[in-house]
Amino acid sequence: MAGDELFRAAYASAAIGMAVLDADARIHESNSALEALLGYDSGALEKVALASITHPDDATRDGRVWERLQRGVSHLQAQRRLVHVSGDVVWARVTFSRVDGGPMRVLAQVEDVTETRRAQALLEHRALHDTLTGLPNRALVVDRLDVVLEAPEPQVACLFLDLDDFTVVNDSLGHEAGDRLLTEAARRLRATVRSQDTVARLGGDEFVIVAPGLTSLAEAEGLADDVRAALRVPFSVGGHEVEPTACVGVALGGPDMSAQALIRDADVAMSHAKRAGRDHAQSFSEGMRHHAQMRLSVESELRAALREGQLEVHFQPIVELATGEVRAYEALVRWRHPHRGLLLPHEFLDICEEANLVVPLGEVVLRDACQFIAERPAFPGRVLVNISTQHIGGAGLVDTVREALAEAGVAPSRLALEITESGMLISTSSTRTELEQLTDMGVDLLLDDFGTGYSALSSVLRSPVTGIKLAREFTLRLGDGSTGDRISTAISSLVASLGMVGIIEGVETETQRRTAIAHGWQLAQGFLFDHPRPASDIPDAPASAPLASPSPTPQRVASVPLR
């Protein structure tokens, strides 16, 4: 009797909910903790069926539990959702224990695990969603895509988006502005797609859209056009008006295709869209996959070429237009492929940049160029070396140049670096510092392919450049009596007024040479004078004069001013 009284006292004052259930799974009696947990008044749960306080989705599970208890199972434990009188869901861990002797009685002990479940749900959400935008991440979108692709004849389109020039916003306006751009892009994408579509962020500035039910490329391309149009509406970021654009790759799912394969195909198509420029869309084709596989093969061969010394540097002279005397050389990389022969830069440099191999390749060229100078002590001119934008700012360019010069025993004044306009326009503090350190060291900087990039004139005025190379595209138009001649004359005048070195590229005919002289150019480079050659084919001391800025009064002819 004393034991029964002790149980009753413990039952009534227990911190967890407790109830005694009869053979029909109705509450015979309950303690105050259970009543408080579910929001009921004292005694209000008596004769209430367990099913009536259980979430409908879990009611069938209670039926199976009760069947097992009726067959003689003594203890069972399960998690289920109970319903508070307010309608809220209460997650509970319920332990059912059958009481021996007499009519069937079951003791239910109810522990509130709602907060634990919420914490678990939050962790699961964070594991499957991007913390910045709230979009599904790669793991979740792959899971959803796999479900759609399990159908015998899956109907789904996958769009792979990459924002254009995102790093420019990030580097110039800061990471907060970059985050603002990403969250706004995510909002616009969600607002544009259908309710059944999934928008995910894979990381960085890459997004994926999974659109089930789309059966044709025309439909998928229409969706790609819609999201590109939604993105390009201008908005303000950090006090600057930004017009976001993106390149989009489109691919359709098919039988026996995995989610990873479909996303890969859309990514490959996006890469092709990127090559066409900003704000482009491209649909996937089987030829693209073959092309991607070929690029991967070439990338692997390139890595081997760097290790095994298959890359070699050829040198093309820069000459005095009037006399033909060699004043400098430009170092140009070539790949002596073991099976395909000598490959020119356009056949592998793009792959080199995508594979992040530009920096080690640039180091090879720098060292060979410095060695070329060291082996020709009687030649007073410079060697010009092209530097990729990937090598500027954070890639150790200054140390690489200093080491290459020291190893060869060459003075910095014998080396000049050619940098594209986009490289000069990179506005990070580390980039500016690096360019200034190079000029302080005594290395000259030349602006390469002038006029084909961005804000050309402003880049000249803001950057520590000492020379300009006019792009071959303008040389081809010399003698047209129109824009080509006007641009050539104007840039030659700019070079002279700034006291810089000016070099006109791509001179291939005698007519172009005479026209360039008439426009005021003094130095030139092109096939008319010589092709790039290996160092072994170039004499140790060619007839030359030091590379210097043009005289204040170059030869000119009257020309029409630029308008």
Image (spheres, grey):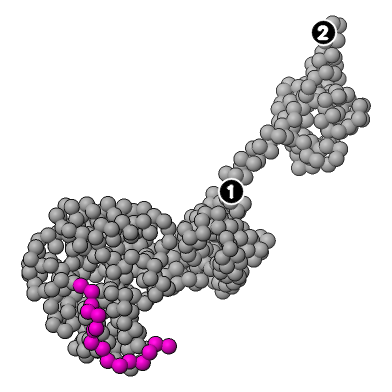
Where residue 318 appears, as percent x and y from the top left, is 19, 75
- Kind of element beneath mark 2: helix
The image quarter containing residue 546 is bottom left
Whether residue 554 sits left or right of residue 200 in the image: it is left
Give residue 3's mark. Answer: 2
Dot 1: within a 10 Å radius of its alpha carbon, few (fewer than 14), some, or many (20 or more) residues?
A: few
Q: Which residues are magenta?
A: 548-563
The amino acid beneath tag 1 is Thr
Which of 353 and 437 lies nearest the eye of the viewer?
437
The image quarter containing residue 97 is top right
Residue 445 lies, with reference to residue 321, above or below; the image says above
Q: Residue at x 20, y 55 (%)?
A: 404
What residue does disc 1 label?
131
Please name the predominant secondary structure of the magenta segment in the image.
loop
The amino acid beneath tag 2 is Gly
Label 2, label 1: how far apart the Cα atoms are: 55 Å
Whether residue 447 sits left or right of residue 329 in the image: it is right
Where residue 24 appears, as percent x and y from the top left, is 86, 29
Q: Residue at x 14, y 55 (%)?
A: 409
Question: Is residue 557 found inside the magenta-colored segment of the image?
Answer: yes
Residue 315 seen by the camera: no
Mark 2 against mark 1, which lies toward the viewer?
A: 1
